[in-house]
Amino acid sequence: MKFTTGLALLSALATSTAQILVPPGPVKGPNTLVFKQIGGIPNNECLTFTNSGEIVQAACAWTHADRQVTPGKILGTDVLIVQRGFAAPFRGDLVGKTACVAFNETTFRAEDCSRNDLLFVRFDVGNGRIQANGAPVCLSGYDSKAFVKIDIGLQRCSQFTVTAVAPTRP
């Protein structure tokens, strides 16, 4: 009898511990947005998520899921939830998952929102910046191939305007 009770207690403890370690899914805000960089690449000023989750600048298209982001929260932390879906050949780790924009110590890109080892990224409406939560890192422009660049130190941050759009199914 004691053995059965002990197993039930261990099972309950393991279940509650797993729930503590895995953050809940993000809560989406009311607006889905398309981001347009002020002074971005002419005719390609809008942020777009590639098949591999990288962020590039492309033509603005309000109805394309790969250009749409929804601000939201995970445990009170602001996040940007990526609208597009991902396929196994490119990002198998994101298939069937909710993706958020995150800083992976190198760049900003789409990552699994349930990961707890990344700094998620937010949009600061007050200054028009896309920046990491808890770190002095912002999106600062683009390179010669239209991939976004980051700035550590918040000295050369790009500014963005947003357009609210109807979310497109991924």
Image (spheres, grey):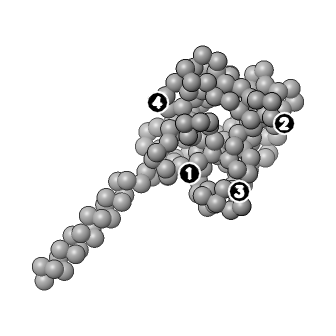
Give x and y (percent) for residue 117: 46, 45
Q: Residue furthest top?
A: 155
Report how far apart the C-alphas of labels 3 and 4 lie in the structure.
Answer: 29 Å
Give x and y (percent) for residue 121: 56, 35
What is the quadrant of the N terminus in the image? bottom left
Please tell me whether mark 3 sits on a helix, a strand or a loop: helix
Does label 3 or label 4 sit earlier along the sequence? 3
Mark 4 is on which residue type? Gly
Question: Residue tagged by mark 3?
Answer: 90
Q: Quadrant of residue 28 in the image?
A: top right
Report how far apart the C-alphas of labels 3 and 1 lie in the structure.
Answer: 14 Å
Mark 2 is on which residue type? Ala
Please tell me whether mark 2 sits on a helix, a strand or a loop: loop
| Label 1 Cα neighbours within 10 Å, binned few <14 / some 14-19 / many ≥20 | many
Q: Quadrant of residue 38 in the image?
A: top right
Report how far apart the C-alphas of labels 3 and 2 lie in the structure.
Answer: 22 Å
Question: Residue tagged by mark 4?
Answer: 134
For the question of whether residue 163 can be seen, the reply is no
Say the numbered circle drawn on residue 59: 2
| Marks 3 & 4, CB-CB < 8 Å contact | no
What residue is drawn where x is 64% and y is 21%?
A: 157
What residue is drawn where x is 61% and y is 61%?
A: 96
* As drawn, 36 above or below 170: above
What residue is drawn where x is 31% and y is 58%?
A: 17
| Marks 2 & 1, CB-CB < 8 Å contact | no
Report how far apart the C-alphas of labels 2 and 4 lie in the structure.
Answer: 31 Å
Say the numbered circle drawn on residue 112: 1
| Label 4 Cα neighbours within 10 Å, binned few <14 / some 14-19 / many ≥20 | few
Mark 3 is on which residue type? Phe
